[in-house]
Amino acid sequence: MNMAGSYAVNLDFEACKACGYCRLVCPRGVYREGPAFNRKGFKVPLVAEESLCTGCLRCFYVCPDFCLDITPSASGAVREKTL
Amino acid sequence: MDRLAVKYLRPRKTPSTACSGCGLGQVHKKILLAIEQLGLGINDIVWGTGIGCSGRQTFNTWKGDNFAGTHGRVYALATGLRLALPEDKKIILTVGDGDAFGIGLSHLLHCARRNAGITVIVADNFGYQSTGGQYGYTTPQSRVTDSSPYGLTDPNWLQNGLDILNLLRDAGAGFLARHLSFEGQNAVESIKRAIGNKGFSLVHIIYPCVTHFGEISLKTGDREAIFRWFENLFDGRSGDPGTPAFKSGIFHDAVGARPEFSAALKAWTSSLRQKENPRA
Ligand code: SF4
Ligand code: SF4
Ligand code: SF4
């Protein structure tokens, strides 16, 4: 079973175009409105709750700009135990 | 860049120049995932296009061989390439609805008739969006567009009993599927089956043009509203009888039922040579 806390959510800040689809489809509320703009002027979402990610990949499939990667995190197992 | 982009796309071309929220990148990503999951590399694929948003943003980002044909003529060019290239080299074309279902339709049908070993991905944004949002052959009925300010009266290929995929099936296509760009692995599976088919395959993927179709036809720039409108096309939940309704998945699968064009032509040529010159 996919476990929360086992995944790293990597968002390429400069490549993001702030469409917001990742926020829209994430069932776990991992993303939030971000505080900062990138060099192209897009207000990039914030990966606010990475530890809640279950690795479902919904955000990965809808990100149109190749700027999201969901990878099993090395420290995930440890984090899971401390929940 | 994500790992797919690092592996397959030219860094100078990434991120693309597509508008924020354009669904084309979602189509593009699914093709790359299919390529990756089939274990194919840069040198296994020649990537071509016709013209428009769907071509411009995809073919020349590919690290391997790629080419742009003329509008609507890429199917004929690719048929020639099919003859010239080794059988295991895959040809993938990313084209738009205007190119495939309008300007190039005749060439496309002949490609299907010949069962040429080509995978066509039609990234459909419901019209001519790169030129400002004029209507095309899949623009939903009655919609206001840049070229139909009082609403579209022309029938399209997707409503009122017509389906362009029926035409392609009757023309002899071996594999046909339809998806929405927001979909996940199921769309990737269709593309894998299409690329794996030695004959002609086409996957029709509908995606949102947020800038022109969104602003002019849906009268909103709100990404969530546009996302939901497109999602509902596939769930039959639009509630509007004038809006097209689609089923996602495989439309027709007759992979392997007919000989592939280039293989058949090469076999016939070599049998002729044998006959004419048996000692050669
Ligand atoms: S993989 Fe799933 S749970 Fe994790 S951030 Fe993406 S959508 Fe949310
Ligand atoms: S889906 Fe991708 S491009 Fe869109 S806001 Fe999220 S990370 Fe940025
Ligand atoms: S004009 Fe429309 S289809 Fe073209 S890149 Fe922009 S959103 Fe995409």
Image (cartoon, rainbow, N blue to C red):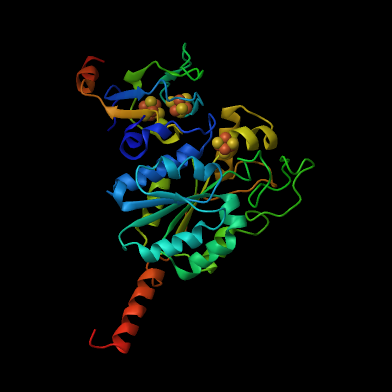
Q: Please tell me in which quarter of the rendered image ligand 3 is found.
A: top right
Question: x, y (%) of residue B68?
Answer: 48, 50
| Residue B222 position (above or below residue B100) | above
Q: Is residue B157 left or right of residue B110?
A: right
Viewer-proximal residue among B178 and A3: B178
Question: x, y (%) of residue B131?
Answer: 64, 41
**Observer able to see residue B59:** yes
Image quarter in which the N terminus of chain B is found: top left
Viewer-proximal residue among B174 and B211: B211
Q: How many labels does the image show?
A: 0
| Residue A22 position (above or below residue B36) | above
Q: Residue at x 71, y 55 (%)?
A: B155
Q: Is residue B279 left or right of residue B87?
A: left
Give residue B222's quadrant in the image: top right
**Observer able to see residue B183:** no
Q: Which residue is drawn at 33% across and 27% down?
A: A54
Q: Which residue is drawn at 42% across and 59% down?
A: B118
Give residue B210's quadrant in the image: top right
Image quarter in which the C terminus of chain B is found: bottom left
State the residue lying farthest toward the right. Answer: B150
Question: x, y (%) of residue B272?
Answer: 34, 84
Question: x, y (%) of residue B105?
Answer: 58, 60
